[in-house]
Image (cartoon, grey):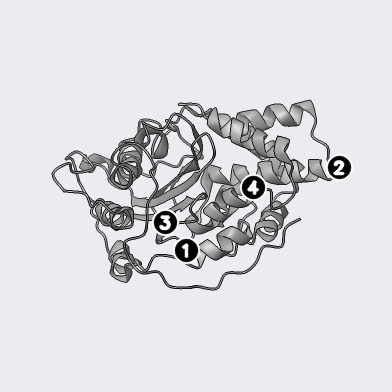
Amino acid sequence: MTARFVRVIAMIAAVTCAASCSAAANQAASTETSPFPDTNVPLAQALDVRLEQARTAALDRGAEASIAVFDRTTNNYLEVGGDQQIETASVAKLFIAEDLLYQDSRDERPLGDDDRALMVAMLESSDDTAANLLWDASGGSDLVNRVAQRYSLTSTTAPYDGLWWNTETTARDLITFYDGVLDDTAGLGADRINLIVDHLRESTATAADGYDQRFGLPDALFNEPVLAVKQGWMCCVSDQWVHLTTGIVGEDNRFIVTVTTREDIQYQDDDNYGLIPDTSMTDATNDESALHARDTITGVAQIIFPDGTVDEWSPSTPTTEKPVQEASGP
């Protein structure tokens, strides 16, 4: 964790909503059919209040959202539910890429042309086969522990079963990771940092498995010409969809945004009751519950950024200090 973000995270806005957390556990599956987000609901001017509005709107659709936003220029940081763990799904591919580039920077395992080609596929089109190969090449679960140590990701843990998609993290840790990479906390060097950012800026509209990966930030930030994103999705974890939309916004990499959602599996047709759209076994691209979950996370991002852009902000509520561990670096 960079020294700057250590200071910034200590100024988390006091907007945690404990009632929302308990409500999510009891939220029944919705049969919502109206457009989301509801354009008849007025949005607050203050960004920190809109974060709360977005989280509440997600709950009404049977989803629990975690949101974190960081301005690397002003050091302003906001979150709601930022410390809640979630499976990374394909966002773990960021950790795979960082660890391989770190080993390359130390001449421990120089990257070959095949490695680089696999990294392009893994980061741009979220290719799972490429991720499997690079995960194994970099040492599997141990790489998560190494990345977590380098960037002081205090709530990021290796997968219990050795499968990269079951790595767990938080919205807050992902902000810390992105900021640490951009600030070269681990000593990757500018060329390797730019390699990661450039691949994320080339994120494809459709993933290698056919899934639409423009949900969330890509669809919501329509007025941001430069956007570097890594998306994650899978089903099912405790009969819920998991979606993550994360990334760096702006030519100067000024803003970092992370939104994650867990959503109950939802179908309009009773004939589909009990259906589990397992993304490791089936093509869920056009699955009704997948469409609903993608609309949810996109709508959450639209509530946060209604003008399709991320603007400078000042917190409208008092902040409280919270101690955070220093980064260990290389």
* C-alpha separation, residue under disc 3 versus residue under disc 4: 32 Å
Disc nearest the viewer among 1 and 4: 4
Q: Is residue 205 above or below residue 72?
A: above
Judged left or right of residue 276, residue 23 is: left
Q: Secondary structure at mark 2?
A: loop
Q: Is residue 118 above or below residue 29?
A: above
In contact (CB < 8 Å): disc 2 and disc 4: no
- Disc on the earlier residue, 1 or 3: 1
**Label 3 neighbour load within 10 Å: few <14, some 14-19, many 20+:** few
Percent across and percent down for residue 105 are 80, 42
* Amino acid identity at mark 2: Asp
Disc nearest the viewer among 3 and 4: 4
Q: Secondary structure at mark 4?
A: helix
* Amino acid identity at mark 4: Val
Judged left or right of residue 209, residue 270 is: left
Residue at x 21% of width, y 49% of height: 43
Q: Is residue 170 visible?
A: no
Q: Secondary structure at mark 3?
A: loop
- Disc on the earlier residue, 2 or 4: 2
Quadrant of the image containing the N terminus: bottom right
Percent across and percent down for residue 27 are 26, 60
Q: Residue 238, labelled with which disc?
A: 3
Mark 1, residue position: 83
